[in-house]
Amino acid sequence: MPAASPGSVSPGSGDPGVLVVRVGAGAVAASLGAATARRTVPDADRPEPGALWRATLAAAQEVLDAAGPPGPTTVEVVGDGGTVVWWDVDTLGSPLPLARTEDAAAHLAGLAATEPHTWALAVAGRYAAGDVASYLVARMTRGLEHLLLPGPAWDLGRCRDAGVPADVLPEPAPPGVPVATTDPATFPGLAVPLTLRAPPAG
């Protein structure tokens, strides 16, 4: 596997009962026990979120096939908190590419000037926002869950103070605690608890 680069992720073996999905801006890695898989996407600096979702499905299916039964008991999503993704709450399609930011509040509020059409639909309740892990959780649960593991780039209080509508913002989730269940019709046949975890420091 090539050396890690900005926006890349690397899988690793671990608990055979936990399917770990690590997502960066331009790559997805999945691991289940010793089975690992990695997928990259085009335009790694500002990828289309749907491409990341398709890469997630492909990597997850590869490790599930390699690991065999009995399959995972938990899915853990490890994301890049310095990202912003928008998606349609009904279709889960994304109107904009993924963006990198160290300040989600400023980025989201700035959308009113840079993308007024998208902002208007967000205010109307059409769009939701979160980091890339939030987006994967939404896709894995068929849009039922809108969650975020808060971090340095994502201060939900600052987002609200900046005028971002409450319905646009995700609910905070604790790390490593089951917060949702994957939808088997959406995420390769799995109906298991879903957790969020921050990437290791460094």
Image: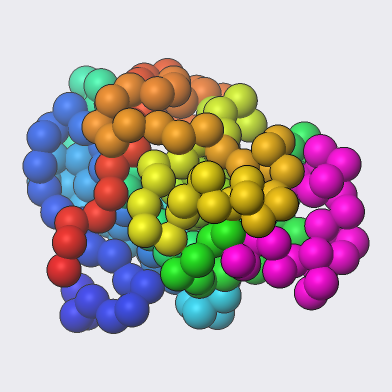
The residue drawn where x is 28% and y is 42% is 197
x and y percentages locating residue 19 in the rendered image: 26, 37
Most common secondary structure along the magenta stretch: helix
Q: In the drawing, does residue 131 fall left or right of residue 115?
A: left
Q: Quadrant of the N terminus?
A: bottom left
Q: In the image, what residue occupies the spot 55% across and 79% down?
A: 43
Task: Give the quadrant of residue 16.
Answer: top left
Say whether residue 171 is left or right of residue 153: right
Please state which of residues 201 and 54 is positioned toward the viewer in this rendering. 201
Would residue 172 be counted in the magenta stretch? no
Q: Position of residue 135 (x, y in %)?
A: 54, 46
- Above or below: residue 14 compared with residue 105: above
126 inside magenta stretch? yes
- Determine if residue 157 is in view: yes
- Say left or right for 201 vs 134: left
Where is residue 154 drawn, in percent x and y? Answer: 46, 54
Image x and y of residue 134, in percent: 50, 44
Q: How many marks?
A: 0
In the figure, residue 7 lies in which quadrant?
bottom left
Magenta range is 106-128
Work out which quarter of the rendered image holds the C terminus and state it. Answer: bottom left
Q: Is residue 42 visible?
A: no
- Judge by depth and name the residue closer to the eye, 102 or 76: 102
**Residue 10 in the image: above or below residue 34:** below
- Residue at 17% x, 27% y is 17
